[in-house]
Image: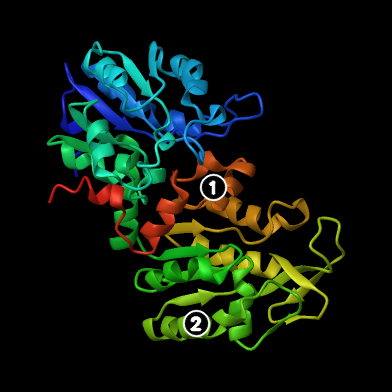
Amino acid sequence: MKTVDSYDFEGKRALVRVDFNVPLNDALEITDDSRITAALPTIKKILSDGGSVVLMSHLGRPKNGPENKYSLKHLISHLEKLTGAYIEFSNDCISSNAIQKSNNLAPNTIHLLENIRFHYQETEGDKSFAKKLAQHGDIYVNDAFGSAHRAHASTAIVAQYFDDKCFGYLMAKEVANAKKLMSNPERPFTAIVGGAKVSDKILIIENLLNIADHIIIGGGMAYTFSVARGGTIGDSLFEADRVEKCAEILAKATEKGVHIHLPADNVCADSFSNDANQQLCASGEIPDGWMGLDIGEKAIAAFSDVLLNSKTILWNGPMGVFEMDAFAKGTFAIADTLANLNGITIIGGGDSVAAVEKAGLADKMSHISTGGGASLELLEGKVLPGVAALDDK
C-alpha cells in the first residue's frame, strides 16, 4: 500500500483527512488531544518536504448545519502550538473562498477547513460534494483510521478524484497491524474478548475462531456463555436470544481446536453499585439476587497463565464494570499482565483503550488502536470503505 513515504510533496498541496474529533469541555477547550497528536507525523512529513497541507475533519455530530460547539476553529490555537505553523482557517469546507485559499496556499503552510459534517452530503457519501472537496489538493492522504469504516464523502468517495492518493502514517500502521494480526500472527495467538453483550461481539468471535489459538471471554457477555454451558447466573447480564449462538460457538471452537476460556469465578454484587455487598461465586453458580460484575482471583490467575504463554495478544473489551473501582480489579489485572509479558500486545476498542490508560499502562502496549468502530469491523473481517478507496490493486 502507498503511504506518504511514497511521495515527495514539494510544491504539492496535500488534502489530508484527519480525525480531529476530540473532546471539548464547556469552555470549548480540548481535554484530550491524542487524536491530533496521532496525525502530527503525517502533517510534519508533508511540510518538511516543502508541501502544503489542507486538513479536513469532522467534530461531533451536528444535526442541522453549523453549530458553534462543533466548529473546528476551537482547535486552531492548540494546533498551531503542536505544529509550530500558522493555521489558515475557512469557515466552510467547499466555498469558493475556501477552495481559492487552498489553491493559493504557500509551501510549509496549513489550511484547516471547517467541520465537514456541517454539510449533510458528507455522511451521505455525496459525489458532487466529494468532487468539490477534491479541488483543495493535488494528492489525497487519508490518516483518519477512526472514520475508515464510514463510506462518507471525505473518507471513501473523494479518493476517486485523485490519481495520487495514499495512507498517512497512522492509517498505514493500523492497517498493517490488523493485516498481520488476522493473517499471520506469532503463535500462540490469544484473543481477549469482553464487554457487556455477546450480540456486539459475535462476528468478532466467529472470525477469531479461524485465527486464534485461545479466546478468553470476560465481562457481561461471559454470563450468556455460562448459561450455554448449563450454569446459573442469578441476576447477571444475560441475552436469552443468544444462548443458542453461544452454544454453537463453543461447539465450533471444539471442532477447530480453539480453546475458549470462561471465568472460573466471579465477583458478584447484590446491586449494580460501587457500594454493593460482594461475594465470590464459582462460574455457573451465582445465586438469585446476585449479579457478576467482575472476574475473580481464580479467573485472573487462569487467564494470566494463558496470556504469559502467548506470543500475540489482542484485547477487545473489559473483564468487568471497571468504571466502578469496586469491580475494576480483574480488568486492571489483565492490563498488568499484558504490560509485563514478552509478546505483542494489541489493544483494540474504546473500553480496552480506556482501561489501559486508566491503569497507567498504555505505554507498555505494543499497539493501541485509535479507531473503535473501525477496529471492530476489521476484527470482524470486513473491508473498510476508507481503506478500500486507497487500494492500489
The secondary element bearing badge 2 is classed as: helix
> Which residue was labeled with disc 2?
245
Residue 321, quarter of the rendered image: bottom right
- Residue 343 appears in the picture as rendered: no
Residue at screen point 68% across, 54% down: 322
Position in image of residue 197 (x %, y %): 58, 68
Identify the colour scheme used.
rainbow
Residue at screen point 16% across, 36% down: 162
Point out the tag, 2 or 1, that comes first from the N-terminus.
2
Mark 2 Cα-neighbour bin, 10 Å: few <14, some 14–19, many ≥20: some
Q: Nearer the viewer, residue 220 or 136?
A: 136
The amino acid type of the residue labelled 2 equals Lys
The amino acid type of the residue labelled 1 equals Val
Q: Nearer the viewer, residue 154 or 243?
A: 154
> Which residue was labeled with disc 1?
353
Residue at screen point 58% across, 85% down: 228
Quarter that holds the N terminus: top left
